[in-house]
Image: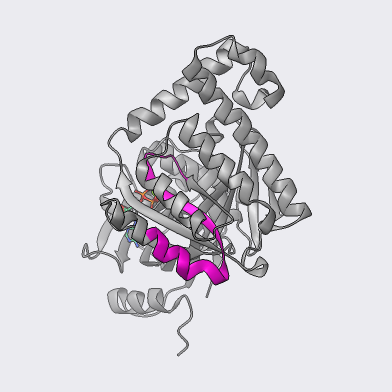
Amino acid sequence: MSAGPAERAIGAFRETFGGEPDGVWAGPGRVNLIGEHTDYNEGFVLPFAIDLAARVALRVRADGVIRLFSTAGTAGVTELDIAGLDRESAAGWSVYPAGVVWALQERGIDVPGFDLALDSTVPLGSGLSSSHAIECAVATALNELTGAGLPTSDLVLATQRAENAFVGAPTGILDQSASLRGRAGHAIFLDCRDQSAELVPFDAPAAGLVTLVVDTRVAHSHADGGYASRRAACELGAEVLGVKALRDVSTGDLDEARGLMDDVTFRRVRHVVTEDERVLDTVAALRASGPAAIGPLLDASHASMRDDFEISCPELDTAVEAARAAGAIGARMTGGGFGGSAIALVPADDEARARSAVMAAFAERGFRSPRLFTVSPADGARRLV
Ligand code: ADP
Ligand code: MG
């Protein structure tokens, strides 16, 4: 039998539940190429789905029971009742599939019970959105098996609802939009105001470039407070400037804005306003010249997050600087900040050098060894078998 990407999920399904699944669905993780802290300012982001994915082998049951098994961890089989799902009844990772079921039920969809075996290649907690990968695989499977046939835009909203109201995470639409809408060789240009999405060519491998992810494995303790205070500063800036959201401010307005607010608020505003422009410039550069042209924009994004938004940390700065010194054409921290991951666009010939340079720089500074991955832009959630 071929060792296709569905094989491990099928094997786990047979072993755990017996017999064959109705099908196997994949939901990829994602990387945000550029556009950080712009989402809640109704601005622009540019993520892509990656070639690491959650695969779920799933078979409908007639008795309204949900049984869940993951090849990761030692939790064994979790059992839930499809009727009366709530946050308290779902423990561990079962909140993600349960949240999706709950959000589909809320839309009036009659979701049956099912057996599900999960096998994921998305590393947990590396900032590649392993949790959304699960949600998007499950949502895509149930959308098909129930015959609901929701359009992708509704699946985006249903998984957001699952996150916000069931899992309890106040997240936007970036992660699931990438996982559901991804296309090999493309990034997804997302307007967080009207939620419209466009595919933009981003065929890094064809351009001879590797996307290296450096997971610093640090999560600094002030991350939550730091996020809340950045959001508050953005809201204050928008209020002072008399706009609905910072999306409505252009770089030409910044000189005047400087005199209207304190320096810290101004720098927060400047990050968001310039970052929105960098996303637009990146989209234009990708369309006109391809991935090799976007390095300086990634670098400028990192500098803005380090100096104006102040959400970087020594580990992220080290990852970015070491990768760049070893040949990366551009690098930036990605995600909310205060730890998490950085990405670097590296010529394929320099990949080994960049990897060892990053490892050496971390060792030299006494940082915990980072985890390194290479990812490429891949297709979004879909049926495999
Ligand atoms: P990430 O940035 O990777 O999404 P989160 O903390 O949001 O980090 O999600 C990680 C959580 O997702 C884990 O704690 C676990 O509950 C769940 N998860 C991800 N992958 C798996 C897996 N293969 N098996 C079981 N649970 C998983
Ligand atoms: Mg997550």
How many labels, in total?
0
Observer able to see residue 113: no
Residue 170 visible? The answer is: yes
Residue shown at the point (71%, 53%) measured from the top left: 286
User: Which residue is at a point 65% across and 51% down the rendered structure image?
Assistant: 294
Q: Quadrant of residue 113?
A: bottom left
Q: Is residue 127 left or right of residue 251?
A: left
Horizontal placement of 99 versus 175: left or right? left
Q: Is residue 20 above or below residue 259?
A: below
Q: Residue at x 63, y 47 (%)?
A: 296
In depth, the one of 5 and 341 nearer the eye is 341
**Percent x, y for residue 382?**
56, 64
Q: Please state the horizontal and vertical placement of residue 118, each as a whole percent of the image.
A: 37, 66
Q: Is residue 335 magenta?
A: yes
Residue sitting at the far bottom: 1
Is 284 or 4 nearer to us in this picture? 284
Q: Quadrant of ligand 1?
A: bottom left
**As drawn, 177 above or below 121:** above
Residue 68 position in % (x across, y down): 31, 62
- x and y percentages locating residue 109 in the rendered image: 51, 49
Query: 247 and 102: which one is in front?
Result: 247
Taking the spot 45% from the left edge, 38% from the top edge, the residue there is 171
Q: For residue 270, what is the image quadrant?
A: top right
The span picked out in magenta is 334-358
Say which quadrant the N terminus sits in. bottom left
